[in-house]
Image: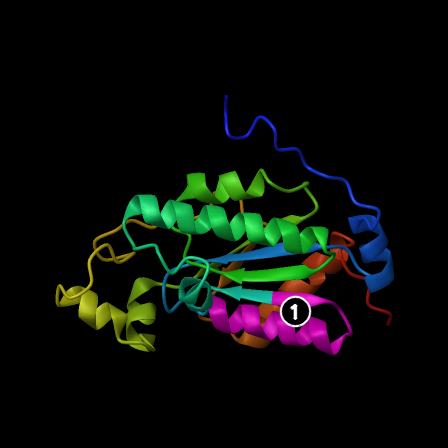
Amino acid sequence: MSSQENIVWHQHTVTRQWREQRNGHKGAVLWFTGLSGSGKSTLAGAVEAQLAALGMQTYLLDGDNIRHGLCGDLGFNEPDRQENIRRIGEVAKLMVDAGLIVATAFISPYQEDRQRVRALFEPDQFYELYVDTPIEICEERDPKGLYRQARAGKIAHFTGIDAPYQPPENPELHLDGTRSIDDSLMQIIQLLQQKKTISIAN
């Protein structure tokens, strides 16, 4: 007998739709992807702050924070990276069910993994945001000194150096990581309004 055979999804009295109505916006995931140093974490934080200032229910899932707990048992080889993204996707799904707008900032280098996460959600719940920054600029920024360590052979399986990054083929937004945070923030807010995830009164 499969360990999953006797496990069923319970429908609760308090629904996602009820929570969304109470919150005044829909639940959704803003999935920021890009190289280390691309600016995705900074941008995800700016989006969360902007939405929170507008009175919306938000949460930011950040790669380093997740690896302190939920994914603290995982390394950085390909299978562990895949499991890391799988767990994050499942957590984000629960948060969307709670009616939150969830910003996630993860390199998530493999197209297949991102597509697997997308499949967890309804079409209007998942937005892939590609922060496209040339690796030369990412290395110049290098806030944690990771590129220098990878170039020196002190970090293995580092995306962009000795591990691949597969850019999104059809992201909801293709953001230029060399432009200002305010410019990218405006594009994201416009996307959320166009998709009717949020409504901001003029």
The image shows residue 85 at horizontal and vertical percentages of: 45, 50
Locate the C terminus and report the quarter of the image it occupies.
bottom right
Give the residue type that dot 1 points to: Met
> Residue 136 at what x, y percent from top left?
29, 67
Residue 59 shown left or right of residue 140 in the figure:
right
Above or below for 95 versus 3 = below
Q: Is the magenta stretch mostly helix, strand or loop?
A: helix
Nearer-the-camera pick, 157 or 2: 2
Q: Which of 72 and 152 is in front in this view?
A: 72
User: Which residue occupies the extreme left position in the image?
Assistant: 152
Q: Residue at x 60, y 76 (%)?
A: 182
Q: Name the residue under label 1.
A: 186
Task: Evaluate whether residue 9 shows in this view.
Answer: yes
Residue positioned most to the top: 1
Front residue of 144 and 179: 144
Q: How many labels does the image show?
A: 1
On whether residue 145 falls in the magenta region, the answer is no
Point 13% across, 63% down: residue: 153
In magenta, the rendered stretch is: 40-59
188 w.r.t. 118: above or below: below
Q: Report x, y in % for residue 66.
A: 46, 63
Task: Determine the secondary structure under disc 1.
Answer: helix
Classify mark 1: residues with Cα within 10 Å, few (<14), some (14-19) or many (20+): few
Q: Residue at the location (31% across, 63% down)?
A: 135
63, above or below 170, in the image: below
Q: Does residue 166 appear in the picture of this structure?
A: no
Q: In the figure, is residue 86 to the left or right of 184?
A: left
Q: Quick check: 193 left or right of 58?
A: right
Q: Answer whether residue 56 is magenta in the image.
A: yes
> Residue 104 sits in which quadrant?
bottom right
Residue 149, position as x, y percentages in the image: 19, 70
